Image (cartoon, rainbow, N blue to C red):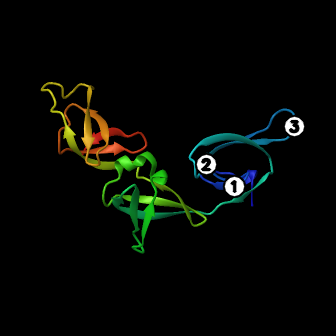
Amino acid sequence: MISTSNFKNGLNILVEGEPYQITWFQNHKPGKGGAVMRVKLRHLKKGGTVERTFKSGEKFELLNVARQKKQFLYREGENFNFMDTNTYEQIVVTPELVGEMSNFLKENLEVEAIYLESELIGIDFPIIIEMTIAEAEPGIKGDSVSNITKMAKLETGADIRVPLFIKEGDKIKVDTRTGEYVERV
């Protein structure tokens, strides 16, 4: 059990039977009454964020969340196959756990699998990954310095907006949180 006085960012707790991670907290002492703790919580399974207020001294159950490195192997129908980089054990992950990040899954990409009490609850991708441009319209001469963008297709089939000077075969860095172009490699 953990008290509100021991809260810190990144702490995983059980609130009303649901698993949450603390992303922000603030101790608030109003002029009248006891102190309260304002907290922003991210649901570990669903991903949504909620704001809650707890009385000072309230206790919560601490959750055991583990991370393991996995390597993406291949896609089989709708599901994704990953391999544990330590034990070489393979696991099958459903599209619900991968979500929209499946647009950035390429062979041998290393990710982190998130386990809550030995149950797989999600996959964490690297923030920046390198991808190759599979298809892109040719740029127009003289447009290399402008901030105008064009659509291009990545090696995984995902579409992304890139600057006009990017061409087929170029390697680029992509931000997986936003799905945006970062820079050319």
Q: Quadrant of residue 110?
A: bottom left
Identify the mark nearer the N-term, 3 or 2.
Answer: 3
Q: Are marks 2 and 1 in contact (CB under 8 Å)?
A: no
Q: Is residue 44 left or right of residue 53?
A: left
Task: Identify the residue at the far left of this view.
Answer: 141
Query: Is residue 151 shown to the viewer in this render?
Result: yes
Which structural element holds mark 2? strand
Distance from the alpha carbon under mark 3 to that under mark 2 = 29 Å
Circle 3: residue type: Gly
Q: Which residue is mark 1?
A: 14
Circle 2: residue type: His
Packing grade of label 2 (10 A; few <14, some 14-19, many >=20) is some
Q: Which residue is mark 2?
A: 43
Question: Residue at the spot x=27%, y=34% of the render?
Answer: 162
Identify the mark nearer the N-term, 2 or 1.
Answer: 1
Circle 1: residue type: Leu
Distance from the alpha carbon under mark 2 to that under mark 1 = 10 Å
Task: Identify the residue at the far bottom of this view.
Answer: 87
Depth check, mark 1 against mark 3: the one in front is: 1
Question: Residue at the spot x=57%, y=48% of the render?
Answer: 46
Q: Which residue is mark 3?
A: 33
**Which quarter of the image is occupied by the N terminus?**
bottom right
Which structural element holds mark 1? strand
Distance from the alpha carbon under mark 1 to that under mark 3 = 26 Å
